[in-house]
Image (cartoon, rainbow, N blue to C red):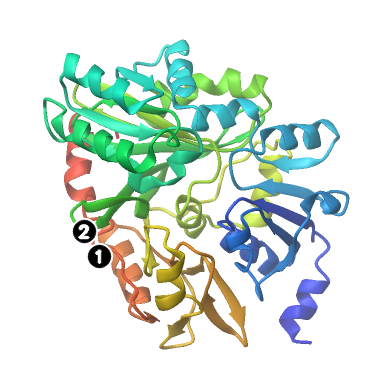
Amino acid sequence: MTPKNKLRSKQPDSKNFLFVSRYGESLDIAFAVQNEGHKVRMYIEESGCREIGLGFIKRTTNWEKHTDWADIIVFDYTGYGEESKALKDSGKLVFGGNTYTDNLELDRNFGQEELKRHGIKILPSREFQTFEEAIQFIRKHPDCYVMKPSGETQELKQLLFVGQDDEGADVIRILQAYERSWGNDFGTFQLQKKVKGVEISVSGYFNGKDFIKPLNITFEHKKLFPKELGVSTGEMGSSMFWTKDSPIFDATLAKFTPTLREHGFIGHIDLNCIVNGNGIYPLEFTSRFGFPQVFIQRAGINEEFGQFLLKVARGENFTINVKKGFQVGAFIVVPPFPYEDKKTFRLFSKDAVVVFKKDKKEGVHPMHVKRINNEWLITGDTGIAVLVTGTGVTMKDAQRMMQNRISNVIVNNGYYRTDIGDRWHEDSDRLWSWGLL
């Protein structure tokens, strides 16, 4: 036993963490918590993702059997609201959402109505059940629209379409194509009027009573290629910083404090917005960990993440110890990302090795990988290999650290965006001019 392991085994504050995951996304968090000296078990719901974490942490196929063992249960995704509430009601320490916050994210129409109910200005939007109904609506009300899937279909991020045509002709063509390929199996979706501005999200950790400061401001990079070209992926990377105060937070999430308190929410919540000189326009909630947001956040938090989660779940009021400056992170992905194609994944990416030129893994976060003979092998079925982060007093410093770390990683057929954080120079000028920083 190494001295490090001896120290770990004697830690008096060691707790039992049970991570309940939809797709295995929280592997990096669970692995970090384990390295801090806690005992960790992880459940992954999706069968195609259950190899994720093999060799990193102990996994289970039935999380309910381990609730008595766990000192804290962490839900990393929406859809577990009822289970989370039942566990909290039984006296268990839980970090995760509830049915109210689940609905904020999964039911786009409900989320928009709740924003309106809290006195927050929203963009005109409408929900549809069929493609033909939406096509006829656009023809009667020509404008530039964003088409957003709702419910479970919204997990397929490449289906989201941001229109460019002022008459909505491009959205009509997309809807017609989806009708031919999906038929009646698409589910509900939303058309939202498009506005120009800076896309920015504000998020915070809520301890059941209040938001814990500082807040997090994130700039997502969703397109596959640099300069925001290509298909929407959900995310290729993010840049961010922490702040004690935010005009965007004051105008939006802060107004939800009494409601979140009423529902006993304990967890992380994010509101993505478009802002410009005319105002702040909320787009959508993420009422759970954001991915890769939480991993980049962790790179900027100067305290053990396990203790941090415990303090939030216990309802403690404290100030998060964070780094000054900026944090950035980029995914390294492999085929067929961002699409689902099991044959392509098996041919080009399954069990491919993540190679480190030098044995330095700091800032390299395991995503959909397993560990065999101390080698990181790509698994799952989506093609997300690792996330690489960097921090710095300036955005350029953070980018430089991230790029240096990426240069130490070799992933066969891997690709990533080289411009994460580049928008900050222009976006910051505009945000300052609008009084939003």
Using a 10 Å C-alpha cutoff, classify the residue at mark 2 as few (fewer than 14 neighbours), some (14 to 19) or many (20 or more): some
Quarter occupied by the C terminus? top left
Q: Secondary structure at mark 1?
A: loop
Amino acid under label 2? Pro
**Residue 428 at x, y = what percent?**
22, 42
Q: Quarter-wise, where is residue 159 in the image?
A: top left
Question: Is the residue 369 above or below the residue 327 in the image?
Answer: below
Crowding around mark 1 (Cα neighbors within 10 Å: few <14, some 14 to 19, many 20+) is some
Residue 153's spot in the image, x, y percent?
45, 40
Residue closest to the eye, 60 or 361: 60
> Tag 2's secondary structure?
loop
183 with respect to 362 (left or right): left
Residue 418's mark?
1
Camera sees residue 317: yes
Residue at the extreme right = 68
Q: Is residue 334 left or right of residue 94?
A: left
Q: Quadrant of residue 257?
A: top right
Q: Is residue 47 above or below residue 129?
A: below
Nearest the eye: 370 or 213: 370
Residue 131 to residue 159: above or below: above
What number is the disc on residue 226?
Answer: 2
- The N terminus lies in quadrant: bottom right
Q: What residue is at 75 percent from the left and 84 percent from the top?
A: 3
